[in-house]
Image (cartoon, rainbow, N blue to C red):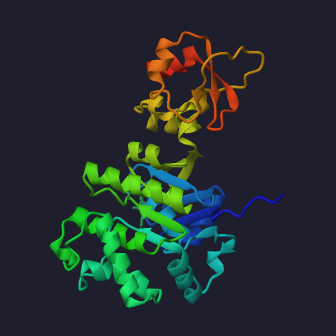
Amino acid sequence: MTAPIPAISCRNVWKIFGNQPERYLENLKKGGTDAGPQHVVAVRDVTLDVRQGEMLVVMGLSGSGKSTLVRCLSRLIEITSGTVAIEGKDIGAMTEPELIDLRRRKMGMVFQSFGLLPQRTILDNVAFPLEMRGQERGARYERAREMLRLVGLKGREGYYPRELSGGQQQRVGIARSLAIEPDIWFLDEPFSALDPLIRREMQDEFLRLKGLLNKTIVFITHDFDEALRLADRIAIMKDGAIEQCDTPDRIVLEPATDYVARFTAEIDRARVVRASGLARIADGVAVEGPAFPADLTIRELGRRIVSDNRIDFPVTDNTGKLIGVMNRQSALDLLLGETL
Ligand SMILES: Nc1ncnc2c1ncn2[C@@H]1O[C@H](COP(=O)(O)OP(=O)(O)OP(=O)(O)O)[C@@H](O)[C@H]1O
């Protein structure tokens, strides 16, 4: 059986800003020194696949290359070297009209700067991409109203962007990108200007839509809690390169580099790691008694772990199948914040 084609696939992608990026890269590959004053290596040799329906969260400090990488994935900026393919098609080889068509049909984008049209009402802003798709007027306004209601802006349809706060403008941007139900969503800190309550609601809405519609999502955030709530995998960037791209469990249990270990040091690992993350093969171990569900976190299972003094607990998936055993001491260590 052949593997399914990834939604997004990038191979050895570099983006260097400066006046002679290709020459600079050639020199770098020959072992030359890194960025001089005229060049910035914003994306460094990134190879990555995003599966259909996957939510990939990109994290890293300011300036680590997150926005640049995400813009390379939709060819909003031209890469210096490497390839990016969307559903198996090399976007570097596409003509401008093909690219526009791809973005219109498949991609949704929400960026930190909201990109709203100042001379249009927010209803018109949200309906705009539907207009570009040729959708009939009544249907597109109906959909735009529904999306504005969803982001909590019902009653403000006739306002102009300048009449809204930053957080409200951000919600309009989100509504606009939700309206077209893209297959692939690129979201650059979409919730950063929202207050905590509405932020959580938007996260829930994203999770719901993702589960419902099987969307592929690439999401940038600074907020680890947000990453942990949303991510199937997290990519941690440093100086333009991906240090590790892995499930949240593995990022905190098996950091690939010292940098990732430091980056995740403050996290309460019991909130991240699920029973499945601690389960090991049950060879020769007695596994009697009530089982623990694989998808609950160690924190969620905390009371049961503390009050049940079996040495090992069976862990089962949601069909009741045994996937392994979890050692109580390891779970307790995690709960108490001890190093495993
Ligand atoms: N148009 C540009 N010209 C020159 N350098 C740029 C340009 N855009 C980005 N850079 C540089 O590339 C590097 C990566 O920037 P990028 O915006 O991708 O980082 P980021 O991780 O998204 O940061 P933040 O979290 O602050 O948004 C930075 O050093 C930045 O200064």
The number of discs equals 0
Above or below 181: residue 298: above
Visible residue check, residue 115: no
Visible residue check, residue 269: yes
User: Which image quarter: residue 254?
Assistant: top right
User: Which image quarter: residue 163?
Assistant: bottom left
Give the residue displayed 55% in from the left and 84% down from the top. 101
Give the residue displayed 33% in from the left and 53% down from the top. 201
Please identify the quadrant where the N terminus is shown: bottom right
Q: Quadrant of ligand 1?
A: bottom left
Image coordinates of residue 210 in percent, x first then y, are: 50, 58
Q: Name the residue furthest left.
A: 163
Image coordinates of residue 117 in percent, x first then y, are: 29, 81
Q: Nearer the viewer, residue 256 or 224?
A: 224
Q: Nearer the viewer, residue 252 or 140?
A: 140
Image coordinates of residue 39 in percent, x first then y, are: 47, 65
Image coordinates of residue 278 in percent, x first then y, are: 60, 27
Q: Nearer the viewer, residue 99 or 230?
A: 230
Above or below 305: residue 161: below
Give the residue displayed 53% in from the left and 20% down from the top. 331
Above or below 331: residue 164: below
Please identify the quadrant where the C terminus is shown: top right
Q: Nearer the viewer, residue 282 or 48?
A: 282
